[in-house]
Image (tube, rainbow, N blue to C red):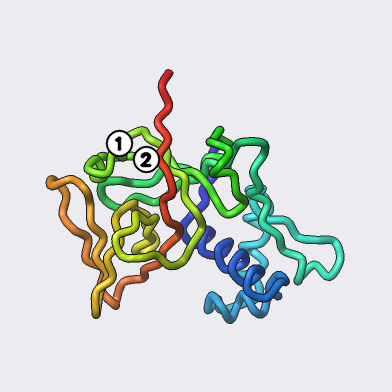
Amino acid sequence: MNKQLSPKKLRFLEFIRKFTADHDRAPTFHEIMRGLKIGSLGTVNWYVKELKNLGVLERGKTNAKRALTLTDQVFGNELPLLGLIAAGYPLEAVENRENIAVPPAYVHPDNYVLKVKGNSMIGDHIEDGDYVIVRWKSEAFPGQTVVAFINSEATLKRYYPKAERVELHPRNPEYEIIHVSPADEFRIGGVVLAILRLYE
């Protein structure tokens, strides 16, 4: 049965991943609350419980509040398929708890796969039904193709930061540039590394 991994849950996982990498330990619940500006420990507990149920987060038996670990580890030459991403207009990413085979060079615990829906990136040879391999990152260089979260929706576009805004460029003249203002909630959820096309 498909379960939803919303942008907010992805953001929660991303915070734990980055904090652990930066501090060589998992964050406490209070640190998560402060870092993500969550209003209560109860909400943090809810996220942990939900993500445990989805199978993407583990909570250790000892000193549990410091023992949160992500479980989206690769198996053989596979990566987790986290769902659909729009290459058109923003669409919420939906989790599909599956794994997909990838070339060995792309097997890494920080990588995951999304299936593309839409054709706004056909100029970069990313077509509807393709799969993209993504590296978890919260920053990108200008011109890179990124998974972008805009006001709790997700899309796949080229990233161009400007002085007071961000532009997300399609690679299809039939689609318009998405202009992200300072008033919008905006985060990068990863950078595209490769495209997979499966033939049956």
Quadrant of the drawing holding the C terminus: top left
Find disc 2 in the rendering and name its residue.
116
Quadrant of the drawing holding the N terminus: top right
> Looking at the image, can residue 139 be seen?
yes
Number of callouts: 2
Residue 127, numbered label:
1
- From what the image shows, is residue 175 above or below residue 65? above
Q: How crowded is mark 2: few (under 14 residues within 10 Å), some or many (20 or more)?
A: many
Q: How crowded is mark 1: few (under 14 residues within 10 Å), some or many (20 or more)?
A: some
Q: Please state the horizontal and vertical placement of residue 163, each as a whole percent of the image.
A: 24, 79
Q: Residue at x 13, y 47 (%)?
A: 173
Q: Please state the horizontal and vertical placement of residue 195, each as a whole percent of the image.
A: 40, 40
Relative to 152, is 80 on the left or the right? Answer: right
Q: How far apart are marks 2 and 1 (CA)?
A: 7 Å
Q: Inspect the image, locate mark 2, and give the three-letter code of the amino acid beneath it.
A: Val
Q: Residue furthest toward the left?
A: 173
Relative to 183, is 45 on the left or the right? Answer: right
